[in-house]
Image (cartoon, helix red, strand yellow):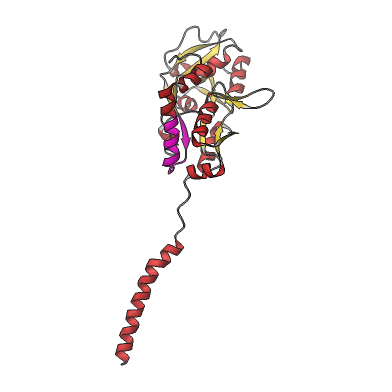
Amino acid sequence: MKREIAILGIIIGIVVGFSAGWFIPALLTEPAPTPLLDQIQDRGYIIVGTSADYPPFENKTYPGGEIVGFDIDVSQMIADALGVTLQMQDIGFDSLIGACKAGTIDMIAAAMTYNAQRAAQLAASTTYISVSQVVIVKNSSLDFPVPITNLTDLIGFDVGCQSGTVMQDELDAISGINVFTYASADVLIQDLNAGGIDAAYVDGPIFNAYETTYVLRVIYSSEEEPLALWTRHGEPALLYEINKVIFDSYQDGSMYTLINQWFGNVTV
């Protein structure tokens, strides 16, 4: 009788153990996080980070302070496709990736060039526009009477760029260039004009935006490089919608309309 009771106890223990094995992990496991796309649509707005000092991609109007530009219009197309409103946040360029990873913003739209280092931290959209980088100087500069053929020709000179950009990476990789970094493009261009630096390395459209205000010229131009929009890894539904807007806007011509509006150098 005691043996039968002992066996019964073992059987009950096994059953309880299996039950615990099935149910306890289910109780302890955290529920899957809500996809970012669902969060955006539930709250009714998408938060897009940019650095509003980089016309014509993004800058603030004066005196109203409204953020406008090509990237803002592209972001608005995405917000419209998602059925939500657009909220832009002005953040220093070199802080944008950290803000997106932390969840402060949902997407980056800031003329941010695609590269492997950024792609390791965030998910990149398909290319939405490609631009060249240019080295610019004051038109009166005697240091560069003719165009240069390589960035190494800048060795020994004071060259400015915006902090956190691929232009900074390229300049820092060349020993002998005196690299000066700036938090914003407008201060960079102002310092170039004032003679604080010998040259500036920027995206081509930045030169186009400022050449009517300052007397500048291009002495070097790179091959075109792709710009991407960025969001967090692990959000395939949102990335799909972003890419779909980019693809559809090129198919229906609306992206060309924006490019012509802000850059004036492309026709359908």
Q: Give the farthest residue toward the bottom.
A: 1
Position of residue 113 measured from the top left corner of the image (x, y, whole percent): 46, 28
Which quarter of the rendered picture does the N terminus lie within? bottom left
Name the residue: 52% across, 30% down: 75
Q: Quadrant of residue 183?
A: top right
46 and 113: which one is in front?
46
The magenta segment is 228-245
Residue 42, relative to residue 187: is it above or below? below
Position of residue 242 measured from the top left corner of the image (x, y, whole percent): 45, 34
Residue 232 sits inside the magenta stretch: yes
Position of residue 107 measured from the top left corner of the image (x, y, whole percent): 51, 36
Which quarter of the rendered picture does the C terminus lie within? top left
Position of residue 202 measured from the top left corner of the image (x, y, whole percent): 51, 21
Q: Quadrant of residue 131?
A: top left
Total number of numbered discs in the rendering? 0
Residue 239, relative to residue 58: is it above or below? below
Residue 34 sits inside the magenta stretch: no
Name the residue: 46% across, 10% down: 147
User: Is residue 145 left or right of 212 when viewed as pictured?
Assistant: left
Residue 156, relative to residue 163: is it above or below? above
199 and 158: which one is in front?
199
Residue 146 shows in this picture: yes
Q: Quadrant of residue 52?
A: top right
User: Is residue 51 left or right of 130 when viewed as pictured?
Assistant: right
137 and 10: which one is in front?
10
Residue 164 shows in this picture: no
